[in-house]
Image: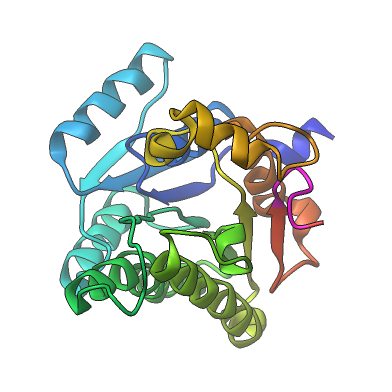
Amino acid sequence: MEAAFDFTGKVVLVTGGSRGLGEAIAVAFAERGAKVAICGRKQENLDRAAERFRERGLEVLGKTANVGDGRQVEEMLNTVDEAFGRLDILVNNVGMNILTPSVVEADETLWDKIIQTNLRGTFLVTKAGVRLMKRSGGGKIINISSIAARKSAPGMGIYCVAKAGVDMLTRVLAVELAGNHIQVNGVAPCVVKTPFSKPFWSNEGLLKQITQTIPLGKIAETEDVVGGVLFLASRFSDFITGEVLTIDGGSLA
């Protein structure tokens, strides 16, 4: 059983891997033998993440990149290729949200920014990453979605639309890439306790409202989501593609 979660020799790229959920995912793969690359927009965040990896006795390759910029994405994948010569597992983790009272009242530049980071970024990194996966005979792509893709939430309207796009992109790519032995799946968590979601869980009143909608009575921890990602990256998921695994403590149920 444990051998199925041994990623020795595998090359993994985690976007947005310098902190929060992305870092937890990257660490989990590194602890299980993978060669790991991460990207982030700020070099200082990548440097701090690399130091935390070293403190654990792990190594990581960090590369600055804005996933919404095709040129920067290509440079990032070229760096991974030069360093490792292949890509086996891609985790599209980068995501962002800016609270908006109403979609129709939002400035179009805000719409573009949220869609670009969440949806366009997933498309661009996948497009570049698949080139490496095809060359090495296959791979696994895991997109980090959200239950917001299926459930409208106050202040998160554009984010909901973007993540719904990620879910459909996951299914479309699963069909298109099946012949290349590339499985494409996703995970859709509820609120996860990370710096990204701090405005929600740091507010006691708001946290209480959220947990009242979750049968298990709490928000997710990073390890809850990491487990789903590891499963979808393992050989146990070899016959699963086009699925988005819900990790929400029963919220949607």
Residue that appears at 62% across and 31% down = 223
Residue 58 vertical placement versus 75 (above, below): above
The answer to whether residue 232 is visible is yes
Q: Is residue 94 magenta?
A: no
**Image spot of residue 164 (x, y percent):** 54, 74
Residue 226 in view, yes or no: no
Q: Magenta stretch?
A: 247-252
In the picture, measured across the screen, residue 208 lies left or right of residue 64, that is right
The answer to whether residue 48 is left or right of residue 246 is: left
Location of the N terminus by quadrant is top right
Residue 122 sits in quarter:
bottom left
Along the viewing direction, whichever of 252 and 245 lies nearer the viewer? 252
Residue at 42% in and 51% down: 13
Residue 235 on image: x %, y %: 75, 52
> In the figure, is residue 26 to the left or right of 180?
left
Residue under the image location 45 percent in, 34 percent down: 194
In the rendered image, residue 65, in percent from the top left (x then y), is placed at: 20, 55
Examine the image and state in which quarter residue 68 appears.
Answer: bottom left
Which residue: 57% across, 67% down?
Answer: 149
On-image quarter of the C terminus: bottom right
Q: Nearer the viewer, residue 178 or 248?
A: 248
In this rendered view, identify the residue nearer to me: 214 or 112. 214
As drawn, 212 above or below 127 = above
Q: Is residue 38 above or below residue 193?
A: below
- The spot of residue 241 in percent (x, y) is 71, 71
Q: Is the magenta stretch mostly helix, strand or loop?
A: loop
Left or right: residue 215 versus residue 9 is right
Q: Which of 163 and 75 is in front in this view?
A: 163
